[in-house]
Image (tube, rainbow, N blue to C red):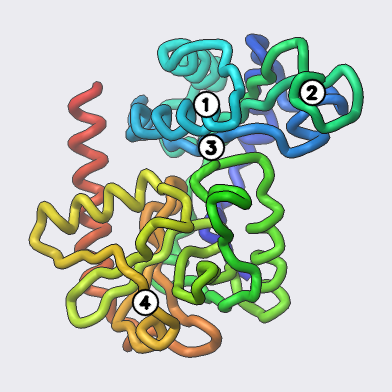
Amino acid sequence: MSTTHEADEDIRNRDIKIYVNGDIVHRDAAKVSVYDSGFMLGDGIWEGMRLYDGVWAFFDEHMDRFFNSCKTISMDVGMDKAGIAEAMRQTAKANGMTGDVHCRLMLTRGIKDKPFQHPQLSTSGPTLVIIMEHSKPVDRLQSAGIRLATVPQVRGLPMAQDPKLNSHSKLNCIIACLQAEAAGADEGLMLDPQGFVNTTNACNFFIVRRGEVWTSTGDYCMNGVTRQKVIDLCRTNGIPVFEKNFSLYETYGADEAFLTGTFGAQTPVAEIDGKPIGTGERPVTARIQALYKELIRAHVAALS
């Protein structure tokens, strides 16, 4: 079984230091209360980011999504974007980290006075946790590709729980992941409420047909930073790209398919529901991967 977040084991992660509300402590001493609203109710927002040569890739875009999400659920971050950047700088410095690092930034509504749902019971302020790990995607997924299974769990309507909220409440995606695992696949391919192909439980989804790159309309999926970068790269490099509705019929007949995410960048898809995708040749995916690596290099150079 593989996942798009699979990484080679790094023993340095056994002794990482974690940021918890201003303190940076060994992972074994990093604690939050059982009364914390994130633990108790999934009431929180998170971001995943990667460190390349001392630069957090597309930090501004991640912070725009993070602060917009926090505003949507009326959660006070307690600091501005510069404050978040400084907390991340301190955490990276404490760990001696400069590259091949993945960060999970998590903010919850904080400790509750009583174990009940109402947000006003969180009176002590938010809980901010920053976990950074030495983490590099495994190489074998680039050649072997990942296996998907279409699952019955769908990405729902915005008035139920907007998929654009990167919330701690991930049960919808966890159920999809479990369904895919039961089907013998690595991740679940999720449809939208109308039955069109949407996203996986962990990543945004693209197909390639006759040189054209297709992805969902974006109405029911996470507004992925890497997803948008891929769309932008296609538009600026003469690769036809479309955000549109399409079905499993077009998906099974695709020449290529790939996933996008902050951790794995672009991960090829080998098969969906047991059906091989294309011939195994992935020229468009390879070109997009090369363009993305160059974009990262230019981005890092501009900020170094």
From the image, tell me which residue sits under label 4: 246
From the image, tell me which residue sits under label 2: 31
**Viewport quadrant of the C terminus:** top left
CA gap, disc 2 and disc 4:
45 Å
User: Which residue is located at x 50 percent, y 76 percent?
Assistant: 195
User: Relative to 114, does residue 252 appear above or below in the rendering?
Assistant: below
From the image, tell me which residue sits under label 1: 71
Mark 2 or mark 4: name the one nearer the start of the chain: 2
From the image, tell me which residue sits under label 3: 134
Mark 2 or mark 1: name the one nearer the start of the chain: 2
Mark 3 or mark 4: name the one nearer the start of the chain: 3
CA gap, disc 3 and disc 4:
37 Å
- In this rendering, does residue 132 appear at all? no
Disc nearest the viewer among 2 and 1: 1
Q: Where is residue 136 in the image (x, y as percent from the top left)?
A: 48, 47
Quarter assignment of residue 204 = bottom left
Name the amino acid, label 3.
His
Disc nearest the viewer among 3 and 1: 1
Q: Position of residue 268 (x, y in %)?
A: 39, 69
